[in-house]
Each structure stands twice: as structure tokens, then as C-alpha cells.
Image: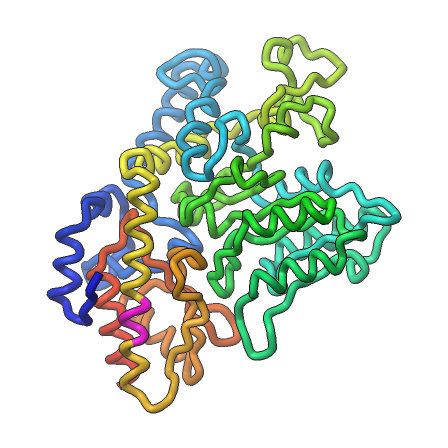
Amino acid sequence: MKFENTLACALQLDKEDKLNHLRNSFLFPQHNGKDCIYFTGNSLGLQPKNTSGEIKQVLDSWAVLGVEGHFKGENPWMHFHDKLTKPLAKIVGCLAEEIVIMNALTVNLHLMMAGFYRPTKQRYKIICEAKAFPSDQYAFASQALLHNLKPEDVIVEVKPREGKHVLHTEDIISVIEQHAGETALVLFSGINYYSGQYFNIKTITEAAHKAGAYAGFDLAHAAGNVELNLHDWNVDFACWCTYKYLNSGPGAVSGTFIHERFARDKNFPRLAGWWGNNKLTRFKMEQNFDAIPTAEGWQLSTPPALLLAAHKAALDIFEEAGIENLHQKRKTLTAYLHFILNGINQKYNYRVIEIITLANEDERGCQVSMFMHKNGKAIFDALTNEGVIADWREPNVIRVAPVPLYNKYEDVWRFGNIIENILQ
């Protein structure tokens, strides 16, 4: 596609965009009476307009039916989960039976590691990317301590090459092979939160299995963003939040994938709770745990109906859009942002903006991380004052993410125009 750094080009691209109408399904923060340029869906997605209606339906059932809302009404809470796994399965590429919606992301990572990280004297290491999200690092370290191991002996970080911001897949494989006999778990992000790099999940999984280790992934920045085929890639488990690209609200309920070879194994080790017990005998309150032979067998507590309602509101829009259509637009929308930013750099005799997110559409999602070589925080503050909601990461990175569900090509062009004016 031929791009131009003109408003006319951006407007034409929007005119040709068959998903452009979905923007009207979301609520935008305002700046001087107009919609902000909202480029931080990688941190918190916008609120769908139908979210309040879905939540109100739960509140109304609670008001009218009380506890009977679990079994009666238009959307009995007992079956809420069943309505969400099929649309979510399309997004992450798996069977509906391999998904459970519960808790929060780091909680679920700990629950998964309770079963998938069982270190022995020989195998005890966890391999991850350097500069993984801090919460993941804390989880790895605390799991090591729970097993009376030293985090510095357990955690192996794969670091970028000297002077680089992203990892080479061959370097990841090399580290896995180097520690093959000692590795219990390879646990990477799907997309690194800082650089925006989309890792080769299939290849990493294959390398982990070849080394005799489990392969798990934190998909916080990948779910609802990039193509995922967790079942076919043979991933052992994965967890994600739903408040970023999945637009389900601050602190929204999390999702977990457990491959069917483990989900169907009722004897696979886990931390158990009553909601993961056999549905036919759950309310008999029997002492012995009988796991549901799906990913639901990992549930602990009664599902949060209000949070599931917010999640449903967002998934309904994904169903309307079609995940393949979203991926197609995402690639073009982010490519246009790369084009605009590269054009700005070409006007200067030094590199003003270093785009550390890879340009290859198979190695990135919506997010573009801009490493600012000069006056980064001042530029970020100026963007905020102009009605651009972006994201700052120390020491000098501005993260922006044009999201195909609600961002326009015009947003990208206006963002570039604002950056140029600030630099001048």
C-alpha cells in the first residue's frame, strides 16, 4: 500500500476501512471538546458504550432476584463463563475447553506455576526475557523462594545483544539449549511490554519441549492484539489480562489457556477450589476434589459476574469485527505510523526518534516504542498538552499503540503532525 504523509491520504485510508464504524462503539476521553488521540490501548483499552448496559443487567438481576440470579433471569450467572470462552478462543487460537476466565493475571501465573513449575535437584531453572514485566519477575523470584531456592540461581534472563533493544530468536534458542538439562520452565512474554517485540511463540515452545521443559507465556500485550494459535503451537499454558487490547475495564478479570493434554488430566497437580469441582456434584459440598476435565478445573472461587459482564461487552465487539479483519487493519495502521515517524526522522541530520519496535509485521503488534534521544519527557508532556494520551516508560521511551477497534488513520497522521510541531 502506498502511503503519503498527508491528511488527504489518512482520510482516504479511513474511508476504505470497513471497520471504521466500530470507533462509534467506544467512549473517548475529551480534550478541548474533541476526542483525544487515544494511543494507550496497550495499557488500558477504551470503554465500550455497551459496558454499562451489560453491568446494569447483572445489577438488575441482583436487585430483583437476589441469590436466584445465579440460576434465573436473562443471563443466569452460573452460565456466564460458558458464553465467553468461544469468542475468546477465536482470539487466542484454541479450543473453548482450553480457556478459563478467572482472577487476575499474576494470580493466574502463580496458579499455573504451582503445577507447571515443580523443580527438582536437576531441573529448577526458569528462562525468561530480560526486562520482563516486573510482576512476572516478582512471581518467578517468589516461586523460587517457595521452593527454598535462590532466585539468582533459578532465573535465567535472555538479554539483547550489545547496543540492541530487542532479542534475536536464535539467541533465545541458544540460551534454552545451553541450560537444557537444568531448565524446568520457559516463561516468556508474548509481546515485551517495553520494546513491543512480538516473540516467536511457536519456535520458543518447540525449543522448550526439546529441552524437556514446559513452555508458558504471559500474553498481557498479545491477547486481542496479534495472531495467536496456542493450541496448534502446542503451548502448555498462557495467561493474559483483559483490560488492555480486550477493553474489559481497569483490573478486569483475567484469562488462562491450558492445553487440552493437561486440561483433560484430572490428576495434573494444581491448587484447587470449589468452583473447579465437577459441576454435577459441586453443590453436594463433598470433601474430595473432583476436577472438571477442562481448563475450568483450575477455577478457585465463584466467578465475578460484574467483571464477566464487562468482558462480554468487549468480546461482543470483537465478534462483530472478526479477529482476522482486526489483524489486517492492525498491520496497516501500525505500518502507517512507522512510515510517518520515519519521515520525521529523515528531516533531521540526527536521529530524533529511534523506533525500537521492529518494523516487520510478524514481529510486532499495535505498539510502537519510541526511544527519544533528546528531551523525551518534555516531548511526552507536550503531547499530553495537545490531547494525545500516550505512555511514558523510563528512562526515555514513549509507547504508542493505534488500536484497530477504535483508532483511525487520521489519528496517526495528526499524531505525527503534532510531533513535528513540537520538535520545531
Check the image and report above or below for 176 versus 255. below
Q: Can I make out residue 52 in this image?
A: no
Q: Nearer the viewer, residue 377 or 14?
A: 14
Direction from residue 45 to residue 343 in the image, left or right: left
Q: Position of residue 352 (x, y in %)?
A: 37, 83
Q: Nearer the viewer, residue 267 or 393?
A: 267
The quarter of the rendered structure image containing the N terminus is: bottom left
* Residue shown at the point (53%, 53%) measured from the top left: 200
The quarter of the rendered structure image containing the C terminus is: bottom left
Q: Residue 104 appears in which quarter of the rendering?
A: top right
Q: Position of residue 332 (x, y in %)?
A: 28, 57
Task: Name the residue furthest right.
Answer: 121
Direction from residue 38 to residue 202 in the image, left or right: right
Whether residue 56 is in magenta: the answer is no
Q: What residue range appears in magenta?
A: 338-342
Task: Name the residue furthest bottom.
Answer: 349
Q: Can I make out residue 67 in this image?
A: yes
Q: Nearer the viewer, residue 159 or 43?
A: 159
